[in-house]
Amino acid sequence: MQHLTVIVLVSAAALYVLWSLSGRGARLAMLSALERVLPILRAVLAPVRRRLEQPSGCAACSSSPAQGRHAGRSR
Amino acid sequence: MTAAAQDLRIALIGLPNCGKTALFNRLTGSRQKVANYPGVTVERKEGQFRGASGRQYRVLDLPGTYSLTPTTLDEAITRDVALGRFAQEQRPETIVFVADATHLPLSIRLALEVKRLGLPMIMVLNMSDLARKRGFNVDHDVLSRELGVPVVETVAVSRRGADSLIATLEAMQIAPSPGSPAGEWREPSSEDVAATHLEASRILGIAGYHEPLRSATVERIDSILLHPVYGMLALGILLFFVFQAVFSWAAWPMDLIDAGVVTLAEFVNGVMAEGPLRSLLADGIISGVGSVVIFLPQIIILFAFILALEDSGYLPRAAYLLDRVMSSAGLSGRAFIPLLSSFACAIPGIMATRTIPNLRDRLATIMVAPLMTCSARLPVYALLIAAFIPDRDIGWFNLQGIVLFALYFAGVAGALLVAWVFKRLRRGHEAHLLMLELPDYQWPNLQNLVLGLWERIRLFLARAGGIILALMVLLWFLSTYPAPPAGASGAPIEYSFAGQLGYALAWVLAPIGFNWQIAIALIPGLAAREVAVAALGTVYALSGDEEAVTSSLSSVIAAEWSLATGLALLAWYVFAPQCLATIAVVKRETNGWRYPLIMTGYLFALAYLAAFVTYRLALAFGGG
């Protein structure tokens, strides 16, 4: 029983660390893979996907170089 | 569908440090960070509340701005949200314009600019109690008539005013207009700006506004705190006192937590049958996570001081004092607040660089922000200081506190040195004058202080119970398996995956005095610095050393390591690269891998060099 509990705990910890240390792109890839393997989870994972897909920080701003525009352009 | 049934999106817009976030927290029950200096909010924040009619209001708290023609990235976010240009964010339907009642002229100019966006607007006169105390007098009816918007008085840090703002919003019965276009808004020309300035003066004139007198007490305090000599002296004494307090005041609660951790480990060992689960709980989780949790009292004391200083209005003055030092090193004076934020965590510090208008200044600040001593480094410092620096007084001062102060100072000195090198390397650097509003002094708000501290405690415990716990479970697994071969004479961990990895890395780290146990701890320490402490706790608990389970980690490493090794590890952590999350934020903020890679490279090189020099010097002086 101790061995089984340890296997579960170590596996869960490994998944948690992998998720925590991954960037947005890697998390989206993991999510897509999970949705492919277990399509039944698609609805449950939808809010997570929405949150990941929403641009945040500088990337969301029209002045961000990532958006191809700059604040000084229209001055 | 009736208007009451539909959500209404409200944007809070106003000058920096006018109390938008305090009002946002008051309206939505959120706990966003508030402080008495400009530039605290650099991202859009969202919250919601329900009015008496049952209508749901979505509130957007936006970074402060002086105009809708942005000069910094945080100001651009405000403009973009107001114009509906922000990615995947619908344009707000109403604007709550927050004005600092004690500094109206700039607010009225911005209000006139915002009103041209064509959205329904309410003007909130925040800090109205302070204005009244200073003899401020303005006719709200005239202001309302001339601006063509309702005017409401608030004191955002108390409930007063928030209710009348909600009542006004409800009475306006604004119809939702999802995704309404921004109309024909264009950036104002210099003629428009001049006309707006004149119009603002006219409105303030007929509303009976006159500039409030500056408090004589503030003048007297500033004459000392902003003095180039006395001011620097006061800043030095203040910081010195903070670091003394961190060590002196935290001793007994830390002893209490330490005793609790040891008792818990002994209890688990006593009640559970021998096996892998017992080892995981006692040696992996309790020893590892317990080694980090023990430093909570020191973190609370440090942040109590930082939060009180943030609320007091002193920090922008410190920025003013240090401007000359920073500009001589090639940093903008506006880098002070981001660098100060980095003492809590480099991530908000790096994000706060959005308030720096010049791109090169911003990049230089991002590159040195990790050298500020973040709170995750405090457990590492505290552990090593407790292990190797005697707990005795030198005059009035505690030696351990002096060493902690010196380590923080070394981080700042390192940042200035690196910034100076960047300045020499980049061409075309021009000096930028520091333009910073000095807020009034105020007594720290107890509620802000308690909420801020609670937020720090929550974050710390969430990390301890989240990523640190998970990493310790993994580290325990890697340090336990595979089992030692039959007839093995060493500790089982030496034959494990982690032990073998530690031995493989030891030759690289041997010149700086690090053993294989430290090598193991440095790897998970890349995920979060304090994990290194937890990892040492687990590694020594699994090393077969009974003392590691029954006594504190600091006494174990004091017995196992030389003084030279302890000092070298301290020097390593002054410069060692930040956690992976920080590197990811640098990548996001600079839109590429170039700067995070340069940063990681130079920090590793500096850390190795500093540890090497420290180790060799300590050996030469008999610390082997």
Image (cartoon, rainbow, N blue to C red):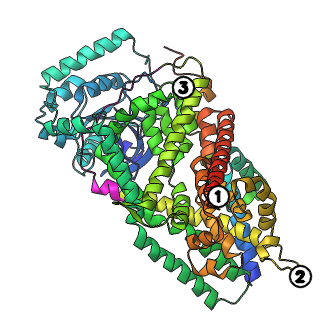
The relative height of residue B257 versus residue B197 in the rendered view (above or below) is below
Chain for mark 2?
B
In percent of width and height, residue B31 lies at 39, 53
Q: Earlier in the sequence, mark 2 or mark 3?
A: 3
Q: Is residue B433 magenta?
A: yes
For badge 1, the amino acid type reads: Val
Q: Mark 2 against mark 3, which lies toward the viewer?
A: 2
Residue displayed at 62% across by 69% down: B557
The kind of secondary structure the magenta stretch mainly shows is loop
Q: Disc 3 designates what residue?
A: B359
Q: Within 10 Å of the Cα at label 2, are there few (<14), some (14-19), or many (20+) other Cα atoms?
A: few
The residue segment tinted magenta is B431-450
For badge 2, the amino acid type reads: Ala
In the image, is A38 to the left or to the right of B237? right
Q: Disc 1 designates what residue?
A: A44
Quarter occupied by the N terminus of chain B? top left
